[in-house]
Image: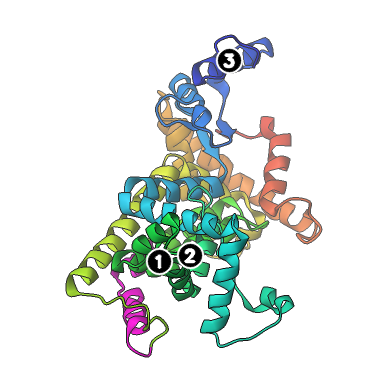
Amino acid sequence: MRDPQGVTAEAVTKKLVEVLEKCELFVENLKSFVSDGASVMMGKTNGVAARLKGLNKFIVNFHCICHKLALACGDSGDQINYIKDVETTLTSIWKFFQYSPKRTNVFVLIQMQLSKLNLPDQGKKVLVTKIQKACCTRWLSLHQSVISVHKNFEASLQTFQFLEKDPLALGLYKKAKSPKFIGAVYMFTRVLPILTELSKTFQSSALNFGRVKPALDYYTQTQLTSQKDSHQFLDDLEWDLNEGGRLGRIGITLSDQDKRVILALNEKYISTLKQNIEQRFGDCLNVFSCFHVFNPMELPNRDSPEFKDYGIASMKVLANHYYQDSKCREQETDELLSEWNKFKFDMLKWKSEMPDPSVLQNTPLEWTLQRLLQMKTELLVP
């Protein structure tokens, strides 16, 4: 952008429209807009995507699904003050050790004492665990940070206590030695693995349009809902805090009020997570997911009872989106369904001609869509 107005959503949109028109392409014919997740580009109200959708409401806006998920998780932390405070404290604990060899050495020695180990220096890297960096915008790193703090909670507390003349150590000791803080850490150990698994599903090289919504539904409606209703993480914490437990020496006890506060935090955090995930994905997911029917590997055989109705529901969703303002909506929808029923026979033939999926440079779905675009003038696609 070489515009004195700067890189604003308004300036980017204006320049984009100008470039398209110079190429004799028009916003009215755009079907989708894909971008990174910067607020200038994807801002819900005034971003470039929203402005383009104002010019053409049929546009489907989308950006990296892993980034969408990370933003939804980051939103949840920002909206709940105590969660944000916990994330900040985890980052502070990492910095406390990361930038001070002296503090790290004390931490290592205390870990070794707690483990009743007496090892030479070269053995420390193998048997001593570092505190990992926490970053709320990269919540996979937050997960690793939670794992390390959870594992080394007693050693961390003892290190802060040993270095109590250090104001930062004293401040971290007071924050960490709190039922609510350790309750949040234990809650994270149950919630973050669910989000990590969802993110790994999205990162799969074999991911196709059809897997996004089912994966979201499974992890948010089933896994997160189950965790919201579960007290298992609190039971684990109580067990570890009991005399003789893993954390029995740190001097934290849970009152009934503490338990209520921790459970309320768990419920609020998961409810906020689910809401933000739905908001981040809901604007385009229904249309986006319909394209999975173009995957020839999912097409039933001709003699299968499912062949006749395969893809009909998805075609109706696409028609409702792209023909929503048409005066001949019903007729165009009928034409689309008719062409789809014919096209399924083309896909059957393509299925037999398609190279083995193991040697394809892209997915079977992408292979089919590329081939479909080559013959788009022959078909009535929306």
Eye-nearest disc, 2 or 3: 2
Kindly identify the residue that appears in the image at 55 percent across and 33 percent down: 382
Looking at the magenta stretch, what is its main secondary structure? helix
Residue that lies at the very extreme toward the left in this rendered image: 257
Of labels 1 and 3, earlier in sequence is: 3
Q: Which residues are magenta?
A: 221-244
Task: Give the quarter of the image for residue 323.
Answer: top left
How many marks are shown on the rendered structure?
3
CA–CA distance in space, label 1 to label 2: 6 Å
Q: Residues under labels 2 and 3: Cα distance? A: 46 Å
The colour scheme of the drawn protein is: rainbow
Q: Is residue 310 something one can see in this rendering?
A: no
Check the picture and name the quadrant holding the N terminus.
top right
CB within 8 Å, label 1 to label 2:
yes
Residue denoted by label 3: 17
Residue 328 placed where, x, y %? 42, 26
Which residue type carries mark 1?
Val
For label 2, the SS is: helix
**Any mark on residue 146, and which?**
2
Instruction: Find disc 1 in the rendering and name its residue.
Output: 185
Are there few (<14), some (14-19), or many (20+) residues within 10 Å of tag 2?
A: many
Among the two numbered marks 2 and 3 on one chain, the one whose residue lies closer to the N terminus: 3
Q: Amino acid at mark 2?
A: Val
Q: Residues within 10 Å of mark 1 (few under 14, many from 20)?
A: many
Percent coordinates x, y for residue 164 in the rendering:
42, 64
Secondary structure, mark 3, is helix
x and y percentages locating residue 351 in the rendered image: 72, 56
Q: What's the amino acid at mark 3? A: Val
Q: Is residue 238 above or below residue 28?
A: below
> Are circles 2 and 3 on residues that touch, CB within 8 Å?
no
Question: Does dot 1 land on a helix, a strand or a loop?
Answer: helix
Task: Please state if 126 lies on the left or on the right of 195 as rendered.
Answer: right
